[in-house]
Image: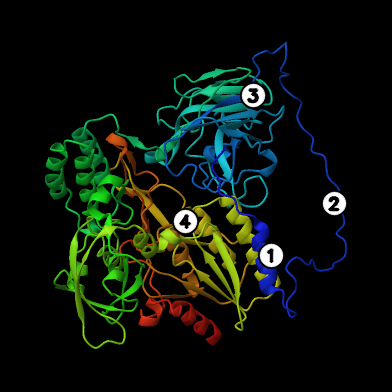
Amino acid sequence: MAHQRTFPLTLVVAALIAALGCGTLTPLLQTPSSPPTPIPTVTQIALPPIPVQPGAANPNEPVLISGNIPFTSPFFLSSTAEPYVLLEDEAGFVQRNLEFEFPVSGQVIGPVEMTGDNYLTYTLSLPSVPRGTYVDVDNNGQSDTGVQVFAVAYWSNTWGDPFLERRDGTGWSTAYTSAITDPDRDYEIVGGTLVVWSPDDQQGFPTGFGADGLLFTADDPTAPIPAGYNLVDLNQEPFRIYKEAQPRIDLFEGAGAVTDLSDMSYSEAFEALFEKASREYPFTVEKGIDWNALYQEFAPRVASARNSADFYRALRDFSWAIPDGHVGISPDANVFFEEQGGSFGLILSELSDGRVLATGVLPGLPADEAGIQVGAEIIAWGGKPISQAISEVQPYFGPYSTDHARRLAQVIFLTRVPPDTRITVKFRNPGTASPTEVTMRAVIDYDSLFQAVPLFNTPLIPIETRMLEDTGLFYIKINTFMDDDRLMAHMWDHIINSLIDNRVAGLILDIRTNGGGNGALAMNFAGYFYDREFILSQDAYYNQITGLFEYEELPTRVIPAPVTYSGPIALLIGPDCISACEWFAYAMTHNERSTLVGHYPTAGAAGEVGRGQYDLPDGLSMQFPTGRPETPDGQLLIEGVGVQPDIVVPVSEDSALGRVDAVLNAAIEALLGE
């Protein structure tokens, strides 16, 4: 089964009960008394007769479908909670209706199991009479009963009961489905296998794509289709329409499949990577990227690489030349040790007034032995003024989409050097008038790095909550949008319902250290704060046919949840709010729904990365964004600038040293002012 990290929901319930269970509030689990609801009478629905009875008389009548679900995407198992396969009603595709909602009464699901390192297996039992949507596709000019058309598709339920609702998805599947779809032609079905059920032998079905190359259009040639279940192989023309009792049908991964270049030479892999990534990269103009110059610089380095470390360094430096937080390469631990494995047990922070302070000094390591104290001002580093020394640092975890995110990383990586490196530092300890200069030798130290990078300290619990004493405000910290989606949906729904039931006066949402994840989940979280649907953005992708960036899918929307929390909200943001987290922050700015508070904007890394994964020689992998987010009127969103705080809180000595949470305090003050 899909990998999950589980967390007992009872802990969240208990925390909320403890926090909110004061005398003036309704206990969270108390159900208001009300008159008993009359039990409705269930109306039996008349079903058509079974057109073909499977058994000895019809040994080939389909009854059970099974197969594999191969995958290469590194995100496929990241947050899957309740996976299954669905006998997916394809009326949405027949109608070209991306808003088509799969009828609950017609949803037939089957189990999925993890049986291999890179694939799942599934089984799907077919009902005697399916409850899908009838579509008349025989092009005979007459109104006929029609047939029901299905694909086998992989789904993971997130919201509500075990069946799909609108928040889970609409339209038709474009990945992990028995049908092959083409993203460059509006996800037209161009191959694969469909499952078609006919109520009798008087219905027709297409036998080819017709002159326009499209399925279910007026020029399709058609022919009668047998009663009962039929399998339609679209990979040959005329289509093969056949019956098989227990067919095996593997699903197709779709556009998110990893581009596998791992069997190529270094130069061949770089050529293929560069050709595809540079063509599909969505921010070339805005970031002023000269792809030709990059090729001239890095192709010779790749060609001269003699080992994995050389190849890695060339690609890493290539990635650093593209200022985008979604561009990256898998790390090489040996290279990192050689170049950055040494440090001094010193953690630094830069204040808004330009001073740089030691905010952490690990005991027994070089900084501590040199006499540097917590709170010391660092004046010079390596013989250069501290600000200049910081600006010359290449932060190893780059690249970055914004200057403020890069600057913060430069402060962190100033102290990272090869082991045994000596560095001269001038500093002034608290309470002293004169600076001190010392020379330190770097030792192997990773603890200071782990403590300095906020995202390394994210709790395993995806959502944390507490009541803020003496304020009447409730605090929720969302640590990620990439965890067990089902778990997070249950937690979120329960928490927001509890806030509404207990009439909580105001809410503080903390997403300062949220590295992103599932964008759809983030949008559905935002839906609990709006009572009307609205379009947030739309992603444009490079079209291989037209050579242009074009919209391919429905716009990103915020869909209202079953309940709405309408109290005032303060949203705490920062540069460690990345990707899907930034979309949540941006969604919360709609109609000024919340007040955004932070030291800095968010990371400014908003490109969609699902299609930009590459496997390379020697076990390396790279990622490039491919989706270009735009407003409904075509303006670029978030990328390169981030979501801006309404209230900018200066980084003071007290906040840098952890004496106060200045951002939280500013948010409390803002909400109490309302």
Cβ atoms at labels 2 and 1 below 8 Å apart: no
Decide: few, some or many residues near mark 1? Use Cα within 10 Å; few <14, some 14-19, many ≥20.
few
Q: Which residue is mark 4?
A: 556
Percent from the top left, x then y, of residue 333? 30, 46
Gap between marks 2 and 1, in whole Å? 35 Å
Residue matched to label 2: 40
Residue 274 numbered tag: none
Q: Which residue is mark 1?
A: 14
Residue visible at 28% across and 54% down? 341
Return the residue nearer the eye: 654 or 505. Answer: 654
Residue 585 lies in what quarter of the image? bottom left
Number of numbered discs: 4
Q: Position of residue 207 (x, y in %)?
A: 50, 22
- Report helix, strand or loop for mark 2: loop
Q: In the drawing, does residue 300 fall left or right of residue 403?
A: left
Q: Residue 64 shows which numbered tag? A: 3
- Residue 272 is situated, as x and y percent measured from the top left of the image, at 24, 36
- 30 or 585, which lies in front? 30
Which corner quadrant holds the N terminus? top right
Q: Mark 2 packing: few (<14 Cα in 10 Å), some, or many (20+)?
A: few
